[in-house]
Image (spheres, helix red, strand yellow):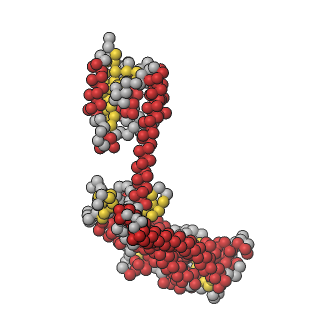
Amino acid sequence: MSKRCVIYCRVSTAEQAAPGHHSLDAQETLCKRYADAHTLQVIEVLRDEGYSGRTTRRPGLRRLLEYTGTEPPQPIDAILVQDTSRMGRDSTEYMLFRRDLRQRSIELIAVTQPNIDSSPEGMLVDTIMAGINQYQSEEKARRVSIAMMKKFEDGWWPSRAPIGYLNVVRDGHHILAPDPERFPLMQLAYREYATGRHTQEGLLRILTEQGLRDHEGRNITRGGLNKMLANPFAWGLMRWDGQERQGRHEPLTDRQTWEHCQHVTAEHNKYVSRARKHTFLLAGLTTCALCRAHHTRTVNRKKRKRYVHCQGRARCPQPYIPENALEAQVADLVQRIELSDAFITAVIERIHDVFERRATITGRKKAILLREQTLAEEKRRAAEHKLLAGVLTDEAFGRLVPEITVELDRLKRRLDDLEGSRRIDTSVLREVFQIAKDIPAAYARSQPAMRRRYIEFFFTEFIVKDRTIVRPVPTPFFATLLQFDRVRTKGVWQPSVNTNLTAEQYVQFVPWLSEQLVKLRGLVLHENLARSS
Ligand SMILES: [Zn+2]
């Protein structure tokens, strides 16, 4: 009786594209010819097309492992492959596989590698080949990642183009070009979203109506849009393998607009759940002094008035209160807050320190870049001198100069970027100062959604009786400031103070408020933008 065998063929996507590789059909033919010549009976031919040797999730391999398992579909004597690299690229897994085969007395025949047999020499060659297979695979992965990093360092996105761009070849270089179809739509996306007028769902609807689809022609998902809006790639910043770099692709938007988009998202995330249910400024912040329950809200559409009230007249006799009456009282409370100069100074100093540190780092980076720029320029001048002196051949000069030019371009881009971020820092600093110096004025200027932020700096709750706020409950921050005389509340009103903090601990609110104000500035910016549009 002739021996029974299974043929296994595999080709990866990369191999299919590369010349000099055997196709699945060619592998099968080679193996079948071998089987005929050695009177082996072929039971099954297994083919894995487009599967890397680095994965074991291959349908053909899975089937093959059934034959080598404890309950094979049929007993077999041999497996035929073109060469051992078809089995896989991981030497450890391959050796384990070989051990299983030996235990079951199944022979692995690599038809183009006759040296591999069950003799000690054959097994040595097999082991060496397995090591080589793995080495080749890893070496290729390394070459690819080096090439990608090189491309990244040249300022080009080394991978698949994000939506809005196309991977194109220009003068032999793989670069990103604006996608004539999607680029204008993505520009529109950032422009519109930055105004704060759209939710992401709303924006997605508009973009889809306008015809925006992904590279496969599918609708963009909400999650996809969210990712795109958050990706600094839009204004030029590329991130790859833990590194950041200004890309040379044409930006979809400028950095400031993109930052507005981030504030809009932050804003939506904070408010969207609450805002959708009700648009009340004081929602969840007012409590009835009698029944101690949070107020509920009712909109009288006929009168176009909104009321806050207790839950059911049966339980509490307190009257309905027009919401704007309460809002006016809260506004008045905020207007009475006067942070002490000492505290404001401390906050401003803190903010100043943070920005100063950033400026120092920026300055240091800039000095390094400028030095590199000088060196590159000197190198170019030296090359020119050498050319004139006849030390350097024209050919060598022609090779050297483009290299230096690329380097100078790169330095200039990084310097520009540094300058850009410095300008943004300065404008943030100025606006934060303005808010810090006069919070009541900033509150009065802002819109309801933003006012909520200011209120939450100072108050956790307002207790209401007979349509009047009888006790505003301060936040720990505000309470501490009150306790240590870092704030005055003009007029008769004096909130009750109850805090366990010590005099020294109030200082902890300096960095806290500084940070809050920087965040708030982003929102104010967005608000102004929304208003002007
Ligand atoms: Zn009540």
498 vs 506, nearest the viewer: 506
Task: List the single residue furthest toward the bottom.
Answer: 491
Residue 387 lies, with reference to residue 327, above or below; the image says above
Task: List the single residue furthest toward the top.
Answer: 1
375 vs 121, nearest the viewer: 375
Q: Position of residue 18 (x, y in %)?
A: 30, 43
Residue 182 lies, with reference to residue 308, above or below; the image says above
Quadrant of the rendered image containing residue 502: bottom right
Quadrant of the rendered image containing residue 226: bottom left
- Image quadrant occupied by the C terminus: bottom left
Q: Residue at x 44, y 36 (%)?
A: 132
Q: Position of residue 9 (x, y in %)?
A: 33, 31
420 vs 466, nearest the viewer: 420
Q: Residue at x 40, y 80 (%)?
A: 531
Q: Position of residue 239 (x, y in %)?
A: 45, 60
Q: Residue at x 42, y 48 (%)?
A: 143
- Taking 51 as reference, is 128 left or right? right
Q: Position of residue 264 (x, y in %)?
A: 43, 70
127 vs 490, nearest the viewer: 127
Residue 98 lies, with reference to residue 525, above or below; the image says above
- Image quadrant occupied by the N terminus: top left
- Taking 491 as reference, is 144 left or right? left
Task: List the single residue furthest toward the front.
Answer: 390
Q: Residue at x 37, y 35 (%)?
A: 58
Whether residue 512 can be seen here: yes
